[in-house]
Image (cartoon, rainbow, N blue to C red):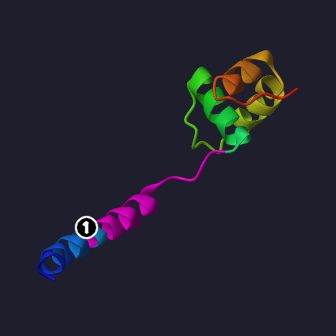
Amino acid sequence: MKHTAAILPALILIIGTAAVYTRQTTRTLPAALTPEEISWVAFCNASGYDPHTTDPEIINEFLDTWRGSSLEETALSKHGINYD
């Protein structure tokens, strides 16, 4: 009984700390990027564009010159994404 009385407060502290830590870390985790989003970010990085842009000319450049190119395949393969 003595051991239980000493262990119980420590156990409650550990469980409470784990619950708070888990709640904080899961709230801040970003969602995983899709292959299309990874491609967009790689294109923007390679071209010097801001990935948050909504400029139609940049979007058209992405669609016309990047999608399906060997540069895109190389960028995606670096992230473990392979299209056969």
Residue 29 magenta? yes
Considering the image in quadrants, where does the C terminus appear?
A: top right
Name which quarter of the figure residue 10 lies in: bottom left
Residue 21 magenta? yes
Residue 9 picture location, percent across and down? 17, 77
Q: Which stretch appears magenta?
A: 16-33
Query: Left or right of 24: which side holds 58?
Result: right
Name which quarter of the figure residue 61 lies in: top right
Q: Main secondary structure of the magenta part?
A: helix
Q: Nearer the viewer, residue 41 or 60?
A: 41
Query: Left or right of 27: which side holds 17?
Result: left
Q: Which residue is mark 1?
A: 14
- Which residue occupies 71% across, 18% down? 74
Q: Residues within 10 Å of mark 1 (few under 14, many from 20)?
A: few
Name which quarter of the figure residue 70 lies in: top right
Residue 38 picture location, percent across and down? 65, 36
Residue 21 picture location, percent across and down? 33, 62
- Which residue occupies 57% across, 53% down? 31
- Which residue occupies 45% across, 61% down? 26
For mark 1, give the secondary structure: helix
Residue 23 picture location, percent across and down? 39, 67
